[in-house]
Amino acid sequence: MLMQSKDKNRGEASENLRIKLSILLHFVNKGIPWQRDDSGSFLREPDTGSRILDTFPKSAIQFSRWTLDTNNTNGLHNCKYVREELQVKFGKFTSHGQDSLTHKNRPAEYVQAKKLFQSLKDVAKHQIVVEYDYDLISELKAGVERWKSAAEAQATFVLQVLSEKGKWERETSGLKRAFDEYKCFAAETIAAKDETISLLTRHLREVRGFVSFDGDLP
């Protein structure tokens, strides 16, 4: 019975390691998942807006602590969204003793795990660079659109100013013409009045001369 119990435990440990190594290989081939909230929306960096990579083991120690059991306070956990996806696709896995994966106990799995740890670091670096470049391009595109909109708004303002300027010039030109016409009219009116005054003055002198002459009659 004791031997059967040991064999069962070893078989469960082997299956646990197989599932965890399969998940790491999946991450290498398909990409490390991004963190999500419970609704499935991506979590993002507050400063850059870049998505955040979810947890993944980078060493044998972290690999041993990696588990779906959130009651394990010392465990390495993925976000809830990723945990649920992993369990559906690969099955349940738990943490295990650090001596479960050593070169002595499981040389093939140990070598595979080390290679996967290094590959995952490279994958993570690549995903972050691509994510940053994507965000940078998006930011540049947004900046172009922002400046384009600003330029269009400025162009509209300039056109409005030019339109107002043209309207003002037309109004000014009209006022100038009206002023010039008024000056001509005023000059003609003044000249006509001067002529009338001159005529009246001569007439008055003539009348006075006639009155003065009549007064001298015997």
Image (cartoon, grey):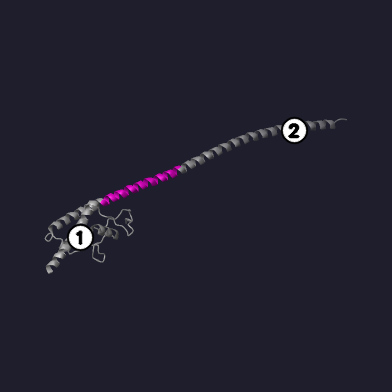
Which structural element holds mark 2?
Answer: helix
Viewer-side residue, 102 vs 2: 2
In the figure, 27 relative to 150: above or below?
below
Q: Earlier in the sequence, mark 2 or mark 1?
A: 1
Residue 138 visible (yes or no): yes
Q: Quadrant of residue 175?
A: top right
Mark nearer the viewer, 2 or 1: 1
Q: Which residue is mark 2?
A: 200
Q: Quadrant of residue 187?
A: top right
Question: What's the amino acid at mark 2?
Answer: Leu
Question: What's the amino acid at mark 1?
Answer: Phe
Q: Is residue 1 left or right of 47 when viewed as pictured?
A: left
Label 2 packing within 10 angstroms: few (<14), some (14-19), many (20+): few
Percent x, y of residue 103: 12, 59
Q: Are marks 2 and 1 in contact (CB under 8 Å)?
A: no
Q: Quadrant of residue 115?
A: bottom left
Is-magenta flag for residue 136? yes
Instruction: Give the residue displayed 27% in from the left and 49% down from the top.
Output: 130
In the figure, 66 relative to 132: above or below?
below
Which structural element holds mark 1?
Answer: helix
